Amino acid sequence: MAPTGKRTRMWSEFTLPDAWAGGAQEAAGAGISDPAMENEAFAGFYERSARPLWAYLARVSADPALADDLMQESYVRYLCAEGAPTLSTDGEAAARRYLFRIATNLLRDYWRRPRAASLEEIPEEFFAACDHAGQTESQILLEPALKQMKPRERQMLWLAHAEGYSHREIAQVMGLNVASIRLLLFRARRKIAALLRACAADGRRS
Amino acid sequence: MNFASCPYEKEVRQLIERGQWPAACLPELRAHVRGCRVCGDLVLVSEAFQHARMESVAAARPVAPAVLLWRAQLRRRNAAMERVARPLLGAQIFACAVALFAAVGFAGFEARSGVESLTWSYWHDWFVHLPQAAAAQWGSLSSGSPAGAAWGWMVLVPAVTMLVLLGGVAVYVATDKQ
């Protein structure tokens, strides 16, 4: 996707000289009419999309601190990306999907990175010993079930059932084909439903 | 695991998305969901995720958008600076290569004078007499004598190369890397 011509950025570069603006002035072309308005457009988009994005990252990674970092990184990458969809030309839905795609890739990169201890290496007793006081019902039921799902399944389930994305949109965000999403989502849904029922049954017994 | 679908799945999904489940649906559909595994799973999972989303959205504490705009601007500026610095590095590598080539050429030219050119005293004398020799040869160079011109070029080329190299370094240092 060539950024020249039609592409218009939604943030201003007015504080930097042209030479240091990273080519964004050329990329913007004649599209920037009012930089302050472009900044306002971004602020509005951020206001509407930041919380759902954080929720996605926090629930899928089960790490709120990591979600903070990845959310900021997602927006910075979105703002720096040359071929990113813009609010003015592509619409907010496309921009939001692109943002979720960046976040999904960042999560994938994070999981691929070698760490001192992965989730699988932490003994089950650790989770069992965790104090559930102060946790909400959905945290008590959904979190243990999500922890037993594969990262890709968690992402897919969240996008489908929390964000309400269609199979095609999930395929775009996750970089998979639509037919695979349909099948994988069906399996993941059946698996987590069984886990949720089991968790609920355990809760009733104890 | 067999992939099964239900004709009511789409309808149930739409009701959940619109927030109309279960209040605004027909009792027949509610009865169907109770008996259908596909629709039952859909309702159970969607409700759990919607609830979790609501809680997480309320718990989110996003930073001010200005911070992100500033960070993005900084990153673009750094990328632009790297792009600017890349040709400078190329120029410096080129200048080094030219200087090395000239030095090797000069050493080869001097080595033709025989075995004595490989001794330390030969090079010591050469450096000691360099200013006088250069002055004399510069005269020959300007007068147009062929032998003098050859030697003069051997001095001129490294000197110019050195200037190019230092020029590149000066420009690099002048650019604010920070």
Image: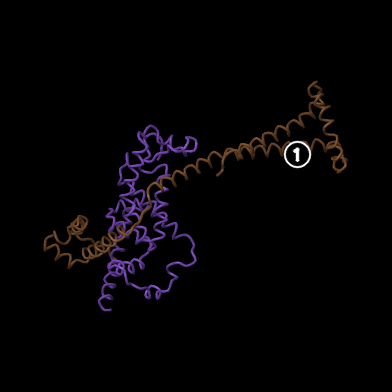
Q: B24 or A55, which lies in front?
A: A55
Q: Colour of chain B?
A: brown
In the depicted structure, whether residue A49 falls above or below residue A132: above
Mark 1 falls within which chain? B
**x, y percentage for residue B8?**
18, 59
Q: Is residue A18 above or below residue A202?
A: above
What is the x, y in percent for residue A71?
A: 39, 54
Q: Quadrant of the N terminus of chain B?
A: bottom left
Type of amino acid under label 1? Val
Q: Is residue B69 above or below residue A71?
A: above
Q: Quadrant of residue A198?
A: bottom left
Q: Residue at x 78, y 22 (%)?
A: B142
Image quadrant holding the C terminus of chain B, namely top right
Q: Residue at x 81, y 30 (%)?
A: B134
Q: Position of residue A1 (x, y in %)?
A: 40, 40
Report x, y in % for residue A200. 26, 72
Check disc 1 and report the residue beneath it.
B104
Crowding around mark 1 (Cα neighbors within 10 Å: few <14, some 14 to 19, many 20+) is few
The colour style of the image is: by chain
Looking at this view, is A186 or A37 the one in front? A37
Count of residue discs:
1
Q: Quadrant of residue A105?
A: bottom left
* A47 w.r.t. B147: above or below: below
Residue A143 shown left or right of residue B143 in the figure:
left
Q: Which chain is purple?
A: A
Image quadrant where residue B34 sits: bottom left
**Is residue A180 shown left or right of residue B34?**
right
Residue at the top extreme?
B143
Residue ranking furthest to the bottom: A206
Judge left or right: residue B165 versus residue A27: right
